[in-house]
Image: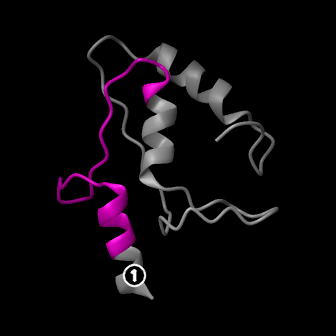
Amino acid sequence: MEGLNLYGADVFKETEKLFKLLHPGGFFVLEIITNHSGKRPINEVHNNIVEDYLKLFNSFGVSTSAKDWLGSELTLKICLKILAEEE
């Protein structure tokens, strides 16, 4: 998630600005739509994997986790299983 995204925003810099607004102990909730494939087609929206987001957020020194709507922890292994079931 380096450089400019499809809309011309620098994801790292914009995320850094966002995290500076959080109060210590605060929460940030991100709702994303992705098929977790990791595919990054040129000139199209990328389908990032969970670890992409965790790596980005952890680079700002915050504690992060990824959960589904039921509160279950998401990992690459689980996402790959979901992706395989959808195909």
- Nearest to the observer: residue 22 or residue 87: 87
Residue 70 lies left or right of residue 53; in this view the side is left
Amino acid under disc 1: Ala
Taking the magenta stretch, the answer to whether it contains residue 26 is no
Q: Tell me which secondary structure the magenta stretch mostly adopts.
A: loop
Left or right, 5 with respect to 34, comes to: right
Could you tell me residue 52's position as x and y percent? 51, 45
CA neighbours of label 1 inside 10 A, class few (<14), some (14 to 19), many (20+): few
Which residue reaches farthest bottom?
87
Residue visible at 31% across and 46% down in the picture: 66
Residue shown at 17% from the left, 59% from the top: 70
Q: Residue at x 52, y 34 (%)?
A: 56
Against 85, residue 69 (above or below) is above
Q: Quarter holding the N terminus?
A: top right
Q: How many marks?
A: 1
Which residue in the structure is indicated by mark 1?
Answer: 84
Label 1: state its secondary structure: helix
Q: From the top left corner, tell me how far across and down residue 87 is, in percent.
A: 45, 88
User: Which residue in the rendered view is the most extreme toward the top?
Assistant: 24
Q: Position of residue 33 (x, y in %)?
A: 49, 62
Q: Which of the colour schemes (rainbow, by chain, secondary structure, one colour) is used?
A: one colour
| Boundaries of the magenta span | 58-81
Using the image, determine if residue 39 lies above or below residue 23: below
- Is 27 in front, or is 67? 67
**Residue 31 in the image, given as x and y percentages of width and height:** 42, 51
The structure residue drawn at horizontal position 48% and vertical position 21%, both measured from the top left corner, is: 19
